Image (tube, helix red, strand yellow):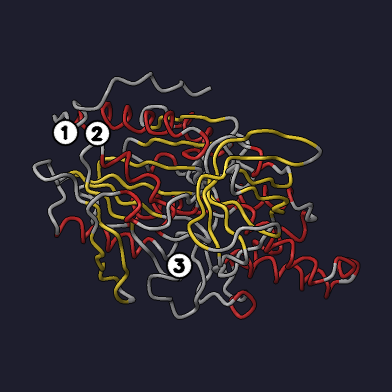
Amino acid sequence: MARSTFAKSVRTAVVAAGVLGLAAGAGAVLIMARVARTVVTPVRKRPQNQSIRAVDLDAGTVTLRETPDSSVPGRYGLWFSEDAGYAKIGGVISREDGSVTRTLESVAFGDLRPGRGRISGYYYLEPSELDYRVESVTVETELGEAPGWLFPPEPGEDTGHWVIQVHGWGATRQEGLRAVRTFHEQGYTVLLASYRNDGDAPNSADRRYGLGGTEWHDIDAALRYAADHGATSIVLMGWSMGGAVVLQTVTRSTATDLLRGLILESPVIDWIDTLEYQARMLRLPDPITQGALRLIESTWGGPITGQAAPIDLTSMNFVARAADLSLPTLILHSDDDGFVPSTASRALAEARSDIVTLVPFATALHTKLWNYDEERWKTSIADWLAEHIHADAGADINAAAPDAPAVEAAS
């Protein structure tokens, strides 16, 4: 889920409705409607919320306005020129006078110069950048063919172990490209799936997100695709809202026989907790927030939000529904997330310490844990797979992997 994109969308909705309208009932209802509609409407144009202050191609540096996104260590993507250009940026070199200078790794396309841009956790844009075999495949869903990228393991390796990646709100299957190497090194077949209304898969009739309540049907179809193409064990991985989609899938699908575990990165465990947190970050009055939630949940709110059916947000609280989960689950979440609070992840890990392993980060923001500390991220997943998936299967497909430090215990 794109934290800054969503926040900017909601903030714009509030401004457009008119803050002064809070004084009048009609104005408050208008703001509720705009907020609710923003939550369930797929974003297509992302805000350019980062200022590019200087570019030195010879020195290989780019200077940005100092923000949480521009200041965090690691490597990221940098979109510019209204997303007509893309570059890869590396570590922080210096901070001075409200600016951050970082390494400029490469410019993939476009003319990088001072102006507006946005920082992305995607990093890789195309499967070809990974130098692995890849196939473009289609998954037959109830709405039609949903495209996916399939990365088979190296020839001669066991192809029965699969991981299906599920992207988040406002994202596409590109989000999961940075994770492919981690699973490929463990001998996995990796499927990066698409789902309704994400710009790749077919749209639903209402062209609205179900926040997991409808998208799970498409991941259910991906599970069946994997089973039909040789999978003998499957791990589902969800990023942000993709975590909510995964949790809906495992509790509603009838095609879970091959599922062996879940990996959730910066996940939405409880939608009400997440949306209330985001509203507080935007300083929305609580009556506005609660009104927007009621619109999303109500049958009468459909004409206002554009939803074909209400969303039962209460049923999407998997802290309350912890007893409904049974698969080994790895959660990676940063406490400074800024969009999806880590509170529900921590609560679920405490409630189901028998099956949930939490790897907390402190300084990685939302869905940027790989970008911030790739080695720790990869090691955490590899160790968890070895302990909870491969050991249970009686397989040791991790035997060739180098020894790695132990995963940090949840605090």
Task: Please name the residue shown 73% across and 68% down the image.
Answer: 13
**Quarter of the image holding residue 336?**
top right
For mark 1, does the 10 Å Cα neighbourhood hold few (<14), some (14 to 19), or many (20 or more) residues?
few
Q: Circle 3 sits on which residue?
A: 198
Q: Circle 2 sits on which residue?
A: 389
Earlier along the polypeptide chain: callout 1 or callout 3?
Answer: 3
Q: Nearer the viewer, residue 180 or 310?
A: 180
Number of the front mark, 1 or 3: 3
Image disc number at residue 321: none
CA separation, marks 1 and 2?
6 Å
Element on which disc 3 rests: loop
Q: Nearer the viewer, residue 406 or 373?
A: 373
Earlier along the polypeptide chain: callout 2 or callout 3?
Answer: 3
Q: Circle 1 sits on which residue?
A: 393
Give the x, y percent position of residue 245. 42, 55
4 is higher (above) or lower (below) than 61? below
Task: Please name the residue shown 35% across and 52% down the image.
Answer: 129
Q: Nearer the viewer, residue 5 or 65?
A: 65
Mark 1 touches mark 2? (CB < 8 Å):
yes
Element on which disc 2 rests: helix
